[in-house]
Amino acid sequence: MATSSLQEWAVIRLAVVQKLGCKGRLLFATVTELAQGRPAPTKMAGVDACNLANSDDRVFFRRTILSKEDAVAWYTSLAEGEKCTPVPTRPDDREGSDGVPFLVPRLIDDQPWPALGLPITEELFSRPGQQALDAAPFIGSVPGRVHRRFGHREGLDAFLLDRAAQAFVARRMHVNLSVYQEYLGSAAYIAPDPIIRQIDHFMVPAKDGRGERIIYRFVSRPGQNLEHLRLTTFDKEARLLTSFDTHQVPADGILDVAKGTCLGQYGYVVTHEHHGVLAYQPFVGFLRQMNTSIQVAPQKSVTVRVPTTSAKDAPPMEYQAAVEQEVASHSILGEVTSPGPSARVEAASQRRRSSTGSAGFPTTRERKRLNSSGRCCGQRASGSCSSILTSERCSSVSSCT
């Protein structure tokens, strides 16, 4: 295949576990499609290997560069049985370790190919403090859409017992498979956003009789346009979903949405008619005020003398400690004329979480105290009660029966 500046490339990272005298078994593989116009990375020389402790197994890793078409063909060809390791598209990159047979378990696609999904690190409508699962821990900090093919961990137990081997793979595959064991024996395809290079959104203060607005700015990739793009925005005010609207993205990429006031939290999802979901932003508020304070080291200090260890004959050590700090300057940027109801609701919610646990439910100690007392909200415990407890009293959120 002839290479050119328009050639699209993909990077395949493949890790296999092999027992002496046997074919290797798929440990994990990722196919990362590079953005159009990005040059191909340099080739990897040879294969990295790591011996598993207390086992005849070894872990082998190799990174190869293929054209996008060849990489897609290799990824979609993975199926139960014997397959071959990828062969680089450029002849100069090929080595004897390419095209070697290895075993692949039965794979189950999370969605039909070529449908891709966008990993979200935080649920769009989750409870505050609720931990979200990382759907694609192997993609790093660069946003991307993924397709996953899940296998199983049969024959990989020796790998899970060797921390050195796990660290070896984590440095090369960018995922800790001892933590994300669902990806053992699996493969994933990672694709960049094919249309959008950058999204900016910011709040414009009220001026000349116009209320506050949110400006969205879309920047397309070279050679692409913003046709068929839609922006769905959702607003949250004092824990209430107050708006859920869909807008057509203009050809110039500038979308001006009037809000009146922007004291709540705002999120969005960007979709394309053909490519599906491309980007998202969970609920976040805008920074309206910032306090800065600069302090300088004081001229006055004291000498502190302490033993170096807890032993009776430990030699002492001395260091200088500041008595107090001197404020050199203090400034406030921005202005908040009224914090609005959202600030009040969030502050009260934070106090409840601090007193009753992060999820807003009774702590273990409080449940034990409730069970031992046999009473809740002045009613006998023979009935049922849904309540939130504090250290001093029981504040009922639903009636006892």
Image: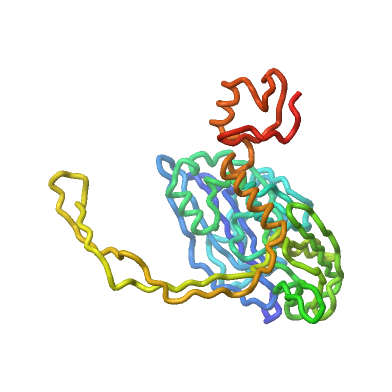
Residue occupying the point 72% across, 24% down? 384
Would you say residue 384 is visible in this rendering?
yes
**Residue 336 in the figure: left or right of residue 211:** left
> For this rendering, which residue is in front, 14 or 322?
322
Residue 56 in the image: above or below residue 86 = above
Q: Residue 287 falls in which quadrant of the image?
A: bottom right
Q: Where residue 208 appears, x then y in whole percent?
A: 80, 81
Task: Pick the quarter of the image with the N terminus.
Answer: bottom right
Residue nearer the viewer, 144 or 296:
296
In this rendering, does residue 92 appear at all?
no
In the current view of this chain or complex, which residue is farthest to the left?
A: 313
Q: Relative to 159, is 112 above or below?
A: below
Q: To which quarter of the image does residue 231 belong?
A: bottom right
Residue occupying the point 78% across, 60% down: 235
**Left or right: 223 in relation to 131:** right
**Residue 189 at x, y = what percent?**
68, 58
Horizontal side of residue 317 vs 38, given as left or right: left
